[in-house]
Amino acid sequence: MSRLDSAIRRLQAQRACLDHAAALIADRDGIILEFGLGNGRTYDHLRGLFPERDIYVFERAVRAHPDCIPDADHLFEGDFFDTLPTAIARLGATAVLAHCDIGSGDAAESAALAAALASAMAPLLAPGAVVMSDLAMGTTRLATLDLPDGVDEGRYFLYRSD
Ligand code: SAM
């Protein structure tokens, strides 16, 4: 598989998981969390899926397309681990979906970041919240969910919080 094929499959898997997660939480009230704004692509997709919900975004340095930048009330700018305490105090355990798109080119660094973020964001998750991630996030508080049809094992990760 070429790197182009791989990139296309990753984006298709990401969109399929976002759409699937939207169906999983359709009958639940609650906020959405986006970790890793990047270019704003997945944030923009989330806005389309959840036009009525509050979506809170966490990003170290905002460099997204100008149309894809949340307003100041919905943006926690800075390192995740610096901004999470403020977010937890403000929002509490009200998130029914958290999407984490945080990986970099460094596999070991990314794995450590995913593990640390899984624990640090837990106080924001409502019981039974769905967590989606580009990286494995194994913790005892997250049960693995089946991926939607067409998404290969290990390409994206879907969990339900306890
Ligand atoms: N979801 C984005 C999109 O669709 O365009 C892509 C996100 S990009 C792969 C990962 C983002 O996570 C980067 O913008 C990076 O700055 C952010 N990030 C990584 N580690 C972070 C940390 N510890 N604190 C805050 N932001 C972080």
Image (cartoon, rainbow, N blue to C red):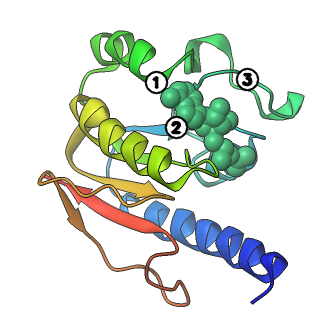
Q: CA distance from mark 2 to mark 1?
A: 8 Å
Q: What is the x, y in percent for residue 144? A: 25, 69
| Mark toward the start of the polypeptide (2 vs 3) | 2
Q: CA distance from mark 3 to mark 1?
A: 13 Å
Q: What is the x, y in percent for residue 132? A: 43, 57
Do residues under tags 2 and 1 come within 8 Å of each other at their CB atoms? yes
Q: Identify residue for label 2.
A: 35
Looking at the image, can residue 144 be seen?
A: yes
Tag 1: amino acid: Phe
Name the residue located 24 percent from the left edge and 37 percent from the top edge. 119
Cβ of mark 1 under 8 Å from ligand 1: the answer is: yes
Cβ of mark 2 under 8 Å from ligand 1: the answer is: yes
Judge by depth and name the residue closer to the eye, 82 or 122. Answer: 82
Looking at the image, can residue 124 be seen?
A: no
Q: Identify residue for label 1.
A: 80
SS for dot 2? strand
Q: Residues within 10 Å of mark 2 (few under 14, many from 20)?
A: many
Where is ligand 1, by quadrant?
top right
Q: Residues within 10 Å of mark 1 (few under 14, many from 20)?
A: many
Q: CA distance from mark 2 to mark 3?
A: 12 Å
| Mark toward the start of the polypeptide (2 vs 1) | 2
